[in-house]
Image (cartoon, helix red, strand yellow):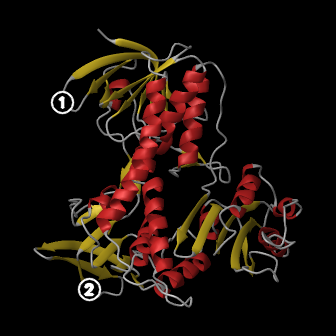
């Protein structure tokens, strides 16, 4: 006999959890099916775990400094202890989420609606019927009026490299290490690669090599921003290989041989103790039997949905496994970020209850840290803008994060991009030791509202000496950009 629900959610990450809680608010009976970790990538293998490790590494780096008139004696660090601290943070979040699910389970919750959590792998038998297979192979069927697919994404594989999650790892396996490797090669110089280069270098137990297949790291950023970050990495003893393609990784009993081929024709073999593959992510839709319910993915592998997150008929999708509209270009894009996932899950719950919840799109707003630098972006860089038919112009300004005479002020670089034909604001990127992470949000709001550079230059932004100069750095950039439009 099948259980019957209003909504079946396959995937217990940000989109699935948000969708379940919102549907509960609206009085719906929900079933969440999750095969792996509750909270998804963002909790177990992504933002929460990596940022916890980043904070621990930063604390160690500060304690190990010898240029402050004092030094710590006998300072040691153990990877197993670091790992346990990270896992404890993850478990705290997971048990908070599980406690909510149990509170609203049919056995406990007497109010309208309920949430049933089933641990297992879901696959479609029909558009109204899902088969759940648990860890011991037992199967059960559940029926639902609507289904939400939010199975997230997974690390992209390198075609000819086998990830064993022991010495050759991706971001899902970084906590499998038993000790700090003496030498770590990171393949891929995007956000994940740069963050883990920072983490392992800050612990000062590992020599880090960062391999980039292009001429510059974080290639989605403008070359000026990329150069600032690259300089910062090198200053902190990270060796960077540019224009290098991974040919193979040969495993030896006591080390790895990483063979790199360079654009100029030469090759190089790097000896390492571990290798981290971080070449992006790909939608995770395997095993759902999508063809059985008439669904197909696009060339990249994600599900295409409309502004209501509807894929087809009674099937919705949210999170990293699906696409979104870009607010600047108006075109479909795939930018896997947790805020969009949460918002989309919420919207799906509204839509199955008859509310017309449309999502406006994404601007690709993101921030991360590389050693002591905050790096942020939103919208389009110059090269991206050209691809979409804009006539981009840019300015890069260097100013202070606080009022110039205020103690603690540091340099902040702001690059702003506009369209010469229309005057429209297209994007911004920032780098600095402080004041970057939140300033980028003002530009993101402007992009969502299709503002021109002139419009943005007239916005009323807060200031006070401890927080920023009278002319906010983004306003200074906008005023300079106006001269080119």
Residue holding disc 1:
136
Which quadrant is the C terminus positioned in?
A: bottom right
Task: Residue 288 in the image: state x and y as whole percent.
Answer: 32, 32
Q: Which of marks 1 and 2 is nearer the N terminus?
A: 1
Which quadrant is the N terminus positioned in?
A: top left
Residue 428 occupies which quadrant of the picture?
bottom right
Q: Residue at 89% x, 62% y: name it.
A: 458
User: Could you tell whether 361 is left or right of 148 in the image?
Assistant: right
Residue 39 shows in this picture: no
Q: Counting other residues with Cα less than 10 Å from the Cα at mark 1, is it few (<14), some (14-19), or many (20 or more)?
A: few
Q: Counting other residues with Cα less than 10 Å from the Cα at mark 2, is it few (<14), some (14-19), or many (20 or more)?
A: few
Image vertical order of residue 320 relative to residue 364, above or below: above
Task: Residue 104 in the image: state x and y as whole percent.
Answer: 49, 22
Image vertical order of residue 352 relative to residue 318, above or below: above
Residue 53 shows in this picture: yes
Q: Closer to the camera: disc 1 or disc 2?
A: 1
Residue holding disc 2:
268
Q: Mark 1 near mark 2, Cβ–Cβ under 8 Å?
A: no
Element at label 1: loop
Which of the pair 100/288 is nearer the observer? 100
Task: Residue 233 in the image: state x and y as whole percent.
Answer: 48, 81
Residue 35 occupies which quadrant of the picture?
top left
Q: Residue at 54% x, 90% y: name it.
A: 67
């Amino acid at each position: 006999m099948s259980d019957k629900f209003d909504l079946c959610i396959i995937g217990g990450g940000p989109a699935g959890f948000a969708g379940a809680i919102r549907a509960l608010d609206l009085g719906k009976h929900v079933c969440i099916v999750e095969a792996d970790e509750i909270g998804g990538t963002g909790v177990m293998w992504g933002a929460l775990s990596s940022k916890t490790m980043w904070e621990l590494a930063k604390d160690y780096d500060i304690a190990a400094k010898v240029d402050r008139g004092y030094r710590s004696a006998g300072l040691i660090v153990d990877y197993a202890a670091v790992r346990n601290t990270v896992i404890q943070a993850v478990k705290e979040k997971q048990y908070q989420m599980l406690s909510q699910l149990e509170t609203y389970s049919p056995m406990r919750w007497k109010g309208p609606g309920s949430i049933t959590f089933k641990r297992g792998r879901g696959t479609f038998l029909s558009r109204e019927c899902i088969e759940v297979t648990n860890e011991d192979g037992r199967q059960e069927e559940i029926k639902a009026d609507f289904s939400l697919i939010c199975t997230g994404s997974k690390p992209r594989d390198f075609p000819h490299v086998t990830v064993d999650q022991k010495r050759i790892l991706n971001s899902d396996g970084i906590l499998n290490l038993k000790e700090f490797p003496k030498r770590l090669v990171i393949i891929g110089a995007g956000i994940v690669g740069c963050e883990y280069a920072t983490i392992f270098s800050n612990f000062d137990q590992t020599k880090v090599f960062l391999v980039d297949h292009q001429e510059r790291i974080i290639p989605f950023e403008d070359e000026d921003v990329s150069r600032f970050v690259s300089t910062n990495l090198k200053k902190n003893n990270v060796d960077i290989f540019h224009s290098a393609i991974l040919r193979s990784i040969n495993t030896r009993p006591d080390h790895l041989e990483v063979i790199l081929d360079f654009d100029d024709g030469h090759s190089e073999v790097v000896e390492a103790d571990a290798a981290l593959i971080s070449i992006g992510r790909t939608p995770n839709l395997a095993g759902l039997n999508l063809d059985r319910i008439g669904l197909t993915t696009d060339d990249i592998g994600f599900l295409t949905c409309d502004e209501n997150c509807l894929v087809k008929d009674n099937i919705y999708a949210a999170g990293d496994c699906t696409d979104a509209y870009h607010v600047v270009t108006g075109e479909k894009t795939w930018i896997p970020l947790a805020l969009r996932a949460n918002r989309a899950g919420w919207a799906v719950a509204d839509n199955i209850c008859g509310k017309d919840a449309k999502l406006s799109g994404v601007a690709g707003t993101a921030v991360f840290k590389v050693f002591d630098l905050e790096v942020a972006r939103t919208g389009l860089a110059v090269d991206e803008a050209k691809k979409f038919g804009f006539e981009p112009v840019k300015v890069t300004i260097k100013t202070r994060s606080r009022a110039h005479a205020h103690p603690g002020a540091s340099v902040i670089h702001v690059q702003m991009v506009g369209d010469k034909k229309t005057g429209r604001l297209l994007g911004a990127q920032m780098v600095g030791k402080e004041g970057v992470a939140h300033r980028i949000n003002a530009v993101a709001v402007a992009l969502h509202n299709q503002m021109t550079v002139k419009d943005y230059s007239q916005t009323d932004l807060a200031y006070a000496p401890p927080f920023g100069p009278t002319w906010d750095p983004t306003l200074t950039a906008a005023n300079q950009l106006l001269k080119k439009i």
